Image: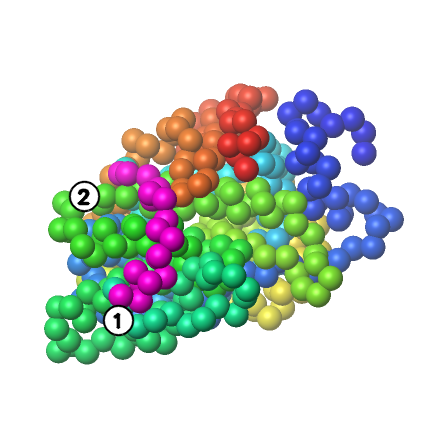
Amino acid sequence: MGEVPVLLQGPHDAGHRCHLFLKPNTKHDYRPFRLRTIKKTWPIHNHFLAHLDAYGLQGFARLTSCDDQVRSDPSLLTSLVDRWRPETHTFHFRFGELAPTLKDVSMITALPIRGEPVVSPRVSPSWALDIAARLGMEMPESQRSGNPRGIPLVWLHDNFLNLSSFANEETRKRHLFAYLLWLLGNLFPNSHGDVVVPGLIYIAENMVDEPLPEQPKYSFGSAMLSHTYRGLCDATQKTSFAQKAPLLCVAYEFLQLWSWEYLPVGRPRIVQPIYPYDFGEGASATMATRWTKARKRWSPDIAKNCYPMYHQQFEILDEAEVTWNPWTQDQLKMVFDARHFTPGMLTDSAFWLTRCNLLFLWCVEPYNPERVMRQFGLYQEIPPPFPRRIDEETHK
């Protein structure tokens, strides 16, 4: 390679996994990333709906239910990682840059952006005992040496899935707490295993114990985007291990639907669109509905072996093939017809172009919407403004 441009930071570039394709004489390992996908679904109980609506979580919860679950395409997500730059928090293509934005979060998941950051106090050293006392059941012993790294998702699912309609209030609260932990664990997957990190216990406790807020209390939307940026930044430095492919820790449902909306590579073809869409009684629909409800022609079995092909298709992609603004009024009308939009899709639009850093637990991630103004239907300066950054120690 020649001299690294001023924009790029040497430490990021030297270990970036894109070199797997940039060095033609190097033996390639084309295995795509592993994903922390949802192995077991958890249907939304009617007793949970009030809390999910109050905290703006129903849209994402629908994506994890058996009816609306998105089947993953690891090859597509891996190809996107190869084009991610930690310095700008954007995907770099030959025609310019694209990035998941707060607007995309609102339209796809309706997660709230307004509200307190998803940051918790210092985790109690006795958190495992506190969980056992609250749920009335001890967690299984960790298979790893040392203290447990989190609350096992499978344990939550297997022990608290079934809730009787005649259960008393205390039992309902235990099941709601277990479900919220499971949902947050899937919204924020991590590299410690299929577990909920202890830092999220505080958030789930408040959601169960406090009176339902009139407006969503927590900014789950900005937290998910921060977590997605951090997961992509970490993934750029991962290559295949000796025995298994590296792990990608992002909210893959969101990122995959984002890619389908903007980019033709790996996008399934909707062969039987449903109009108007049937959301189901009381369901909170988002723009993800047109992908989850319609019949699609797409084979995930074939897609697992498409990583090199996807990479090449991104190389030759022309800007005319990009859907720069998938959130037009025509698209909204197609999905919602005359019905009201899901609360949260448009109510936080004033924050879509914010220049604040995005926070999630220990993650602090710069947000640079001015580099992808075409995604907002606005004029894009060329070259784009220099990205806002934070010091490397904070970023790590």
As rendered, which of 157 and 13 lies closer to the eye?
A: 157
In the image, residue 116 lies in the stretch drawn in magenta: yes
**Which labelled disc corresponds to residue 371?**
none
Q: Quadrant of residue 15?
A: top right
As rendered, which of 271 and 346 lies closer to the eye?
A: 346
Q: Is residue 324 above or below residue 147?
A: above
Q: Amino acid at mark 1?
A: Gly
**Disc 2 element:** loop
How crowded is the residue under tag 2: few (<14 C-alpha within 10 Å), some, or many (20+)? some
Mark 1 in CB contact with mark 2 (< 8 angstroms):
no
Which residue occupies 65% across, 45% down?
Answer: 237
Q: Amino acid at mark 2?
A: Gln
The residue that disc 1 covers is 136
In the image, residue 263 lies in the stretch drawn in magenta: no
**Which labelled disc corresponds to residue 215?**
2
Q: Which residues are magenta?
A: 115-133
**Disc 1 element:** loop
